[in-house]
Amino acid sequence: MPPLKQSEGDKRALVAWREGGSPPVHLGSRDVRSSGHYRSGRSSAIVAPQFRHLAGRVWLCPGDPDPDAVQAGVAVVADERGSVMIDAGQSPAHAAEIRAALAAAGLPEPRWLVYTHHHWDHVWGACAWPGVEIIGHASGVPLLGAEAARPWSHRYLREQVRADPRLGPSFRARALAMDSWDGFAVLPPARTFTDTDELPVGVRLRHVGGGHAPDSIVVSVPDSGVLLLGDCFYPPPAHLRRPEDGLDLALIRRLLDDDHGWYVSSHAEPMTLQQARSYVQTD
């Protein structure tokens, strides 16, 4: 699927934001692609996020296909004993859309929320999920603590981009995602682990680390044959990336096995085991 293009209205709003004007919250219209989940502007109808069934107990709600939006998808492992949500949504507003999509699909509210890693597009929606137990890798706790201590606001985002232009793509996406900072908080996990963990509903967590984030984990749902990868094999974030950094295909090769028929990363379509093996094969 090709990336969406920014409208001229979007570009003017971003320029105004960089120069200290109003935050670019409501932007001009964008194309709505066949993924059926999001984006729209003032004059176009909103296409709400939707969950689609993948396999067994696993349901997926894709993120925005526009790479400039930096919006990760989320997954839900539906269970009458308590569902597990994998990643929190990009913002409280995104989390509210995900909750509505859960209800529309007839899926139960989550009891547990698992962070695949600490990056903002995976955790900033957590404050909109009261009552869930947040689970993540122990190495993410200090990283999220440092993020929680920042004075987040549209003004702060502008100041940071001016000080380090390499932050521009990420921080402008944050400005677009956040229409209000009221009640916003970056939440660390309440439950942590160092190597592996397993939830009472048979969902298994495994730390894999990698260049993208030191706290990256993968989530296995054995009875459904699904492995949720987060961003574990991606290169480091753009502002930290070196020319030689690329996809960590060796990490994916280590994760492939016959127990999982589906492999799901946060910013791409799911791959079957055969597709994943083809993807990582080398000459």
Image (cartoon, rainbow, N blue to C red):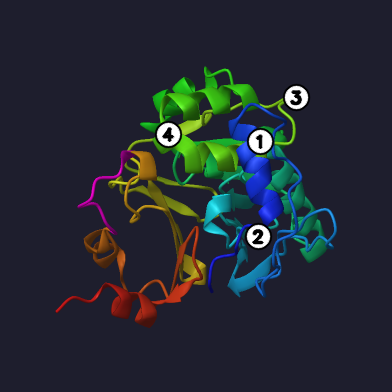
Q: Given the image, on which type of amino acid does mark 1 rest? A: Ala
- Residue range highlighted in magenta: 240-247
Q: CA distance from mark 3 to mark 2?
A: 31 Å
Q: Which residue is mark 1?
A: 16
**Is residue 69 visible to the viewer in this orientation of the structure?**
yes
Q: Position of residue 158 (x, y in %)?
A: 56, 27
Earlier sequence position, callout 4 versus callout 1 = 1
Label 4's element? helix
Earlier sequence position, callout 3 versus callout 4 = 4
Q: Residue at x 73, y 24 (%)?
A: 183
Q: CA distance from mark 2 to mark 1?
A: 43 Å
Earlier sequence position, callout 2 versus callout 1 = 1
Location of the C terminus by quadrant is bottom left
Q: Which residue is mark 4?
A: 165
Q: Which residue is mark 2?
A: 78
Name the chief secondary structure element in magenta. loop
